Amino acid sequence: MIHDSFGRALRDLRISVTDRCNFRCTYCMPAEIFGEGYKFLPRAEILTFEEIARLARLLVGMGAVKLRLTGGEPLVREEVEKLVAMLAAVEGVQDLTMTTNGFLLPQKAAALQQAGLRRITISLDSLDDAVFRRMNGNRSGVQKVLDGIAAAEQAGFSPIKINAVVQRGVNDHTIVDLARWAKERGYILRFIEYMDVGTLNGWRLEQVVPAKEIVARIHAEMPLEPIERNYRGEVAARFRYRDGGGEIGLIASVTMPFCGDCTRLRLSPEGQLYTCLFATEGTDLRGPLRAGASDAKLEQIIREMWSARDDRYSEVRAALTEEARHQSKVEMYHIGG
Ligand code: SAM
Ligand code: SF4
Ligand code: SF4
């Protein structure tokens, strides 16, 4: 086990398997920027599955027992199920999951389940087709994602988790509908406060709907009560419906930061490790990896990086100047949330 400068252990590893995506969500990869001419990482610069699995094995040995595959869109990486199988075979992995926009799940859900993926989170910001299209750059209607969710259920994923980013004036008028829909189907819905990740999405504080307000709006229609977190370090604040009909979670990184418990490390597609969602630079592992570094050498690099970790961006965000907030932070599509 390794601990950072605030005594936080390393527990969760988020692996971004690609910087590409078939959606253009305005809050993540706005189409104006990620257009035809946008240069994504060339194949040779992206870690191979073998390289990812080797790093994962080392990191699991250092405490990262929860693995999440993300992106970009993880399902656009060819044969990602092969990577799932390799990670499922790593000794010590307690949880292996994926966050996806769901579009390709009808083709992929069964293969992912067979490969050993046990849980899945599907992003769906609204059930209103026009609203959803506006948010994803008109790349998908709601039905496509619903088909993906159905495929995941059929393949045996349970429970299904749904992520919804909430933006004031964009989809906040549809959150109660989404909550009712998830409740009826037994899905665990997690609302995410719109975050100032990266520098490309033109984030404004006025567009953040505070978690408290989200809860109040749902509570007014379907009464809720708070419940304990599942474990220390869980980022979602949880509420259950008083009628016993399931729960919702709130990821309130803007209004209720949780840096004190943050045990997450992020691996980018080209092999950089980021110790914070809002980091301005990463630690390169691909260089040493491809130069033939031993496991011991790689472990030493990771240990040094984690020991020096002092990130708590969300806790200090309010005190930062505009300029500091706009420093060249890593983008969400790059490290996957
Ligand atoms: N493409 C996959 C998906 O959308 O589920 C995985 C990668 S995506 C970057 C991971 C999660 O981050 C998604 O649930 C997405 O909605 C969320 N996300 C992206 N940009 C965000 C932002 N600016 N604020 C809050 N959440 C964001
Ligand atoms: Fe793609 Fe996910 Fe970002 Fe949307 S949030 S653009 S689906 S990576
Ligand atoms: Fe963790 Fe950084 Fe988010 Fe704080 S701001 S919870 S340190 S990722």
Image (cartoon, rainbow, N blue to C red):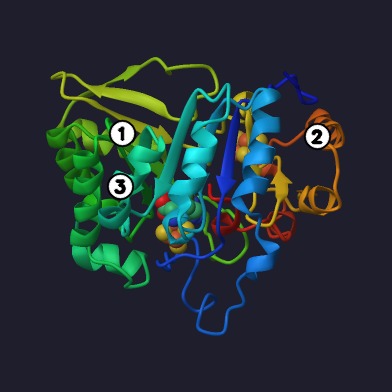
The mark that comes first in sequence, 3 or 1, is 3
Q: Which residue is mark 1?
A: 215
The mark that comes first in sequence, 3 or 2, is 3
Q: Nearer the viewer, residue 210 or 10?
A: 10
Tag 1 and tag 2, C-beta contact below 8 Å: no
170 relative to 70 in the view: left or right: left
**Residue 217: x %, y % from top left:** 25, 38
- Is residue 241 shown to the viewer in this render? yes
- Alpha carbon distance from label 3 to label 2: 33 Å
In what element is the residue under mark 3?
helix
Q: Nearer the viewer, residue 265 or 177?
A: 265
- Identity of the residue drawn at 57% across and 41% down: 14
In what element is the residue under mark 1?
helix
The mark that comes first in sequence, 1 or 2, is 1
Residue 104, quarter of picture: bottom left
Q: Which residue is mark 2?
A: 295
Q: Quadrant of the N terminus?
A: top right
170 relative to 146 in the view: left or right: right
Q: Nearer the viewer, mark 3 or mark 1?
A: 3
Q: Which residue is mark 3?
A: 109
Q: Is mark 2 within 8 Å of ligand 3?
A: no
- Is residue 318 shown to the viewer in this render? no
Within 10 Å of the Cα at label 1, are there few (<14), some (14-19), or many (20+) other Cα atoms? Answer: many
Q: Amino acid at mark 3?
A: Ala
**Residue 324: x %, y % from top left:** 74, 55
Q: Amino acid at mark 2?
A: Asp
